[in-house]
Amino acid sequence: MKSFKKYIIAGSIGVLATMGISSCTGDLDLLPTDPSDTTAASFDEDPDSYMNAMIADVFFGLCTYGISDNNALNGVADGGFSTFQRGIFNCEELPTDEACWLWYANDTEVGQMPFGIVGTTTAMAFAPYYRFIVNASICNNFIATWTAGESYVSKANEANRMKYLCLARAVREINMFYLLDLYGNVPWIDDGTAVGSTPTQYPASEIYDKLVAEMEETLASFDTYVTGTPVYGYFGKDALDAYLMKLYMNAAQFGKSANDWSNAYAHAMNIINRHKGEGFNGSGLCYDYNQVFGAGNKRFAPGGGDVNEILFTLPQEDTKMTTYAGAELMCLGYGNTYGDGSMQDMYNVSGAWNCILGRKQLAEAFDWNDDAMSQSDDQRVRFWMTSAHGYSFSSAPLNADNCPNNGYPTIKFTNWYINNDGSIDYDKSGDVNANCWNTDYPMVRLAEIYLSAAECILNGGGGSQSDALTYVNYIRERAGISAWSQSQLTIETLKAERQRELYTECTRRTDLKRYGTWISGSKWDYKGSDSNYSGQDFPSNFNWYPLPPNVCSMAGYDQNPGY
């Protein structure tokens, strides 16, 4: 048993050490429970329970930054920055036309990232890199342990062993997707990455090829080993289909000659065909837009027991974890006390961080009933604080000292339980809670798949123009606004609808890159400058974030160009 047990302890340490992260198991807290309760020394007593604890840790790394309020990543002072969802949000949303982080003036870890200006000292920009590597390494630890440990699980748990191996590979691949999407030329981690070795760095185009091939293989294995309704907090085929769709429709960003609209469309349709028949107009969407982002939204996730618009969720309601990410970040970060509205009355959350605002360009993307942008029929801005609450847009710098004159709190997540008719169920909403423990964070949902399928159709990937119109009108009509005619649906109008539906859902920077308007071609408040309100183009190398400099020096990796 000695040779098998070594994987349990050593599985992540070698890879983490090469990434410039502490290899101390006390720092990493690799188990989701007290390490003294489940250790390698007690393995013989109950291997099945040990396996269950390890797969829980694979998913645990998606939800929080460390155990018992301890940051798992040395070198990043603010542990919240290192959380999976928050790291992606910081990189995908804060430098764009959708959101701005106000607390940067005295925070060296943030630097000028709210203006899109990043460098090798911007910890907010490279903290996600560490998180993805840590998560992928924990997945590899599980895979190495339970591939070698086949004979140690009970016969009754053999089916779970095979299922968990598939899930661990899928979680690793999702982390690799974001590693590729944000950093481009990155190390490749797969089953062949030996314990203690330094993963080999490859160009983005080669990482893309490897990841597509591996994800397609893992997706095929789900048909055999990951069947039935997923346990709440885990996921099924929908998540893998969704990330393959994302890969294919952004292939040109990763060094391929063109986006692969046909394969992207095929994976989108896999999901759509599995969900049709329930929900809003039989689309599989929730009946009301704000249900997806309110208390009790776990019922719309895999294993939740209702319409499953959420394809991949980050649980918070049942875990009661303080994460500084996910729905907690979205409720409290956008929570603002400068206006004339009470947070508790408006969206059932106490406390506020007053640190994120929506930019003017996001507000202007919606249809308003007045020039002051105070009222709209669009239910996607239902909980915003607007000029009706004392907020406005001006050329004031985007920092906390200038609230409420430099942006709207574009509140999307609430602690309200929303009924199918859009009304609030005050009894089911529960007590006001500063940590928004009643709301989970949807990483991917069906609405994105419909919009992506429509984009694939308009780019010649398959389907019909009438199908694309149907998919987009599901989105519009659910939001409470008028359906489009065929002539109103174009690539440009679809892009605008995608922003209205998916704002602040960790897709914006990738979308702007796909549209060819990230570096140049569009401007927003203070883009590329902390002093130019009108904005300016980014340097051409800003398509990728820099790799952490200590990673490059320790592992011998090439830094991304321009840094």
Image: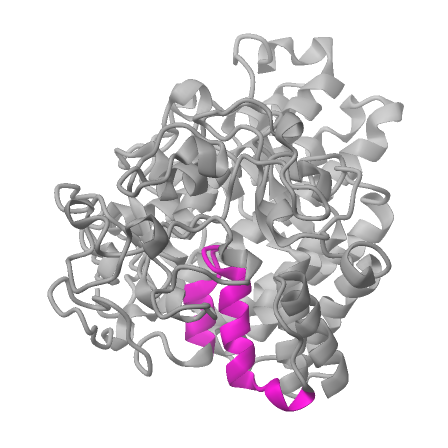
Residue at 60% of width from left, 49% of height from top? Answer: 290
Q: How many labels does the image show?
A: 0
**Residue stretch rendered in magenta on the structure:** 486-514
Residue 32 occupies which quadrant of the picture?
top right
Q: Observer-nearest residue: 67 or 167?
A: 67
Q: Is the magenta stretch mostly helix, strand or loop?
A: helix
Q: Is residue 244 visible?
A: no
**Closer to us: 456 or 241:** 456
Give the camera-side residue of 31 and 333. Answer: 333
Q: Which quadrant of the figure contains the C terminus?
A: bottom left
- Above or below 187: residue 195: above
Q: Is 469 left or right of 260, judged from the image as shown?
A: right
Q: In which quarter of the image is residue 372?
A: bottom left
Residue 450 image point, x, y percent: 68, 68
Residue 220 shows in the view: yes
Using residue 496 as the reference point, say whether residue 148 is left or right of it: right
Find out whether residue 504 is within the magenta segment.
Answer: yes
Considering the image in quadrants, where does the N terminus appear? top right
- The residue that appears at 68% across and 50% down in the rendered structure is 311
Q: Residue at x 17, y 41 (%)?
A: 107
Q: Is residue 193 left or right of residue 329?
A: right
Instruction: Give the answer, above or below, for where 180 lies relative to 320.
Output: below
Dividing the picture into quarters, in which one does residue 148 lie? top right
* Location of residue 427 in the rendering, given as x and y in whole percent from the top left corner: 65, 26
Q: Which residue is drawn at 63% across and 9% down?
A: 42
What percent of the width, then of the height, locates residue 205? 49, 72
The colour style of the image is: one colour
Whether residue 193 appears in magenta in the rendering, the answer is: no
Rendering coords of residue 176 (x, y %): 52, 54
